[in-house]
Structure formats: C-alpha cells, structure tokens
Image (spheres, rainbow, N blue to C red):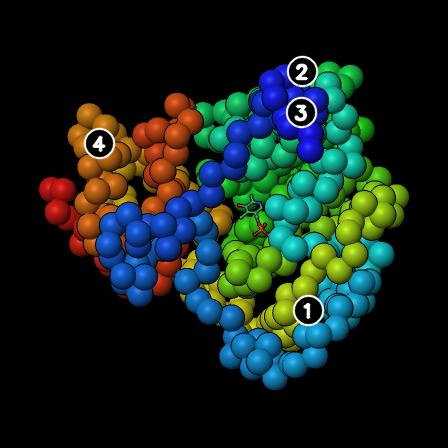
Amino acid sequence: MYTYSSPRLVTVRPEMDRLDQYAPGESLEAFSARTGIPLGDIIKLNSNESPYEPAPSVLKALSNFSSYNHYPDANSAALRSALATYAGVEEHHIVVHHGSSELINLLWHLFLSVGDNVLCCPPTFSLYTSVTSFCGAHVLEVSRKENYEVDIDAVLTALTPQTKLIVLTSPNNPTGNAISEQDILTLLDTGRIVILDEAYVEFSDRPRGFAHLVPQYENLVVMRTFSKWAGLAGLRIGYALMPDWIQAYMRRAQCPFEVNIAGHIAAIETLKALDYTLNDVRRIVEERERLFAMLSRYSFFTPFPSQGNFILTRVDESQVKVNEIRSAVEKQGILLRYFSQPAMRNFIRVTVGKPEHTDNIDKALHTLL
Ligand SMILES: *Cc1c(COP(=O)(O)O)cnc(C)c1O
C-alpha cells in the first residue's frame, strides 16, 4: 500500500489555496441548533427566499407524479419550451441547470483559464469571487459609486487583455438597485462576455429584464432562477439565455440530467400557474414598501431603495451596534443577513417576508429604544 507522507506525491492545483468557501446565510437547522429556538418558530429572512410556498397545483403535480425511477429528459424540451414563452426568446437560447449558482460555475469554467480575470462591481454577490478562484483566475474589482450605480468609466479603464467576463447583477444583491440599458449596451461594446444576473428581476420595475437583447448579441448571457420569485429555492432550478455558440459549449460541458425530474415538474407547473405566483410577487413588492417605511422610522438605520425582495440598510453604529441589533432580533427567532467584508460590516440585509414578519422585526427593534 502506498502511504502518503510529506511531501505528498499528488496535491491539488496550486490555485486552490486561494479558494475561500462561499458562506451562505445560516440555515434554519444551524440557527436552531445554535439558539435552541424550535425550527417552526424561526423567521428566516437571511437568504432572499420567498416567504410563500409554491402554488397548490405545483405541490399536487409533484406528489401525483410517480415515475421517479426514470432519468429526466436530457434535453429538458418541455421546460425549455415553457421558458421560451415566459422569457420571450427562442428555445435554442436556453440552458437549464440545477440552480443559477451551478450555471455560474459552468460558465466561468468555459471561459476562464489560469491568469484570466473577471470584472465585478462590489458590493455584489460573492459567489462570483469563489468560482473565479476555483478556475485559477482573478477578480478585478471596480467599486460602485456612492449611490451604488456601476461606475462605467472606471470599468472601461480597468479592463485588461485578460478580462474575459464582466458580471453585473440587476437588481443587485445586496444593494437592490438595477442597471440601465445604456450601461449594458456600453459594456457589450467592449466585446467581453457580459453576464447579467437577473435573479431578482421579477421584483423589479422592469420584470421582463433584458432577455430581449440576447438574440441580438453574441456576447450577452442573462441568468435567471426559480429560487427567489417562484418559491422553489429547495428544488434548485435555474436557467440562462445566451447566444447559440455559447449554448453549444454549455451543453457539451454539462453533465447529463442536471435538472432532476422534480425540478422540471415544479418549474413547468409554476409557469402554468403563473398568475398565482406573480400574485405572491406582488404581495412581496407591496410588503417591501412597508418594510422600508418601518426601517426608516429608526434613526440608526439608513435603508436603500430596492428593486429586489430584500432591503439593504446601513447602521449608524454611534447609536447602536450591529451586534446589539443582531442579538435583539435573534432572541425573537429572526434571522437576518450580516456581512464579514470590512466595507459592509455596518450593514444588514433584510429579506422581505410576510406582513407579520415585518411586524415582528419592528417589535424586536423596539426593545433597543
Ligand atoms: C440567490 C442568488 C443566486 C442563486 O440562485 P440559485 O438559482 O438558487 O443558485 C444567483 N445570483 C444571485 C445574485 C443571487 O442572489
């Protein structure tokens, strides 16, 4: 038997030492174990999940189906056809996958070699950074302006010959603002692959997003997910709209049967019962305004207007510390999102929940006055 002693005969790629594990919002189970609060009493507002369950017809279709012993359709023809109608682009532009996180992983691996870079505009979704390191590539960070708009001039100046991807989230997580069409067109003109992550587009003022640009450009990829607006985070279903040439490479790189049958059924049924789910989206958008007004009443908060299902607020730590807020709300079983990056330490992101969730946060905050 070969015994590994130091130095090991085989090690992982050297770039792996730069890889930080992505830290998702704390799970219900972990929070319950840490605080002793029963699972059923927790209000989970830290991962931008929907507070509403899928439509009854979705749940019924999942339980009525029984042929789970077969593989799903590797072409996902029925789902891609339903998505084509929903997104308003033809099926050959659509790739489906188990969550848009995995689409990010696959796309990055298609384009990035060791030494390449990806241009990101922080603060933004940090998964882009961990996946970039996994490819042995680097992130080129161009900070957003004070109002969180993308600094287009700074982006254009920062590009290098090794910049393969420009990634933009719209509405942006965690800041909540959207990008303008003019800015997207300017970035497309750079010839880099522009990845537009529209995970929250259904909650925005422009719920159809920029899908209509996909057939016109050879370098635009629009990413979407059923995790946020459709209440299907647990089933892992995402899709992307892209030009044919990238689509062909994606399909080649993908392992077969990536989206499970339950994911196919749930997504197709959600699109059939679209009015039901869009009504939940409407309730969340209404509640976002109530949550914004509630947060604004506390002098230590400066909330930012949001087009997503979450609100980012700055905390004036000369009045109250983020940790004091955290322990006050956690005592009431409320999970919010906190940040470890130095620039974001005095910020909290709150997912929009049901009206009673807003009221519960309000009550917990009152204990601080
Ligand atoms: C939540 C989120 C995703 C991940 O979506 P999944 O489909 O659940 O993997 C992607 N992008 C952004 C910006 C998100 O906030």
Helix, strand or loop at label 2? It is helix
| Callout 3 crowding tier (Cα within 10 Å): few <14, some 14–19, many ≥20 | few
Q: CA distance from mark 3 to mark 2?
A: 38 Å
Residue 161 percent location from the top left of the image? 78, 17
Above or below for 79 versus 28: below
Helix, strand or loop at label 4? It is loop
Query: Which label sits in the foreground, 3 or 2?
Result: 3
The residue at which mark 4 appears reads as: 321
Residue 203 percent location from the top left of the image? 52, 55
User: Where on the picture, by quarter, is residue 168?
Assistant: top right
The residue at which mark 2 appears reads as: 157
Mark before the other along the chain sequence, 1 or 4: 1
Quick check: can you spot residue 136? no
Helix, strand or loop at label 1? It is helix
Q: Amino acid at mark 3?
A: Thr
Q: Amino acid at mark 4?
A: Lys
Residue occupying image coordinates x 35% and y 34%: 347
User: Where on the picture, by quarter, is residue 134?
Assistant: top right
Above or below for 113 versus 257: above
Indicate yes or no: mark 3 CB to ligand 1 under 8 Å: no
In the image, taking residue 262 as reference, residue 33 lies left or right, namely left
The residue at which mark 3 appears reads as: 11
User: Where on the picture, by quarter, is residue 111?
Assistant: top right
In the image, taking residue 266 as reference, residue 243 lies left or right, namely right
The residue at which mark 1 appears reads as: 261
Q: CA distance from mark 4 to mark 3?
A: 44 Å
Mark 4 touching mark 3, by CB under 8 A? no
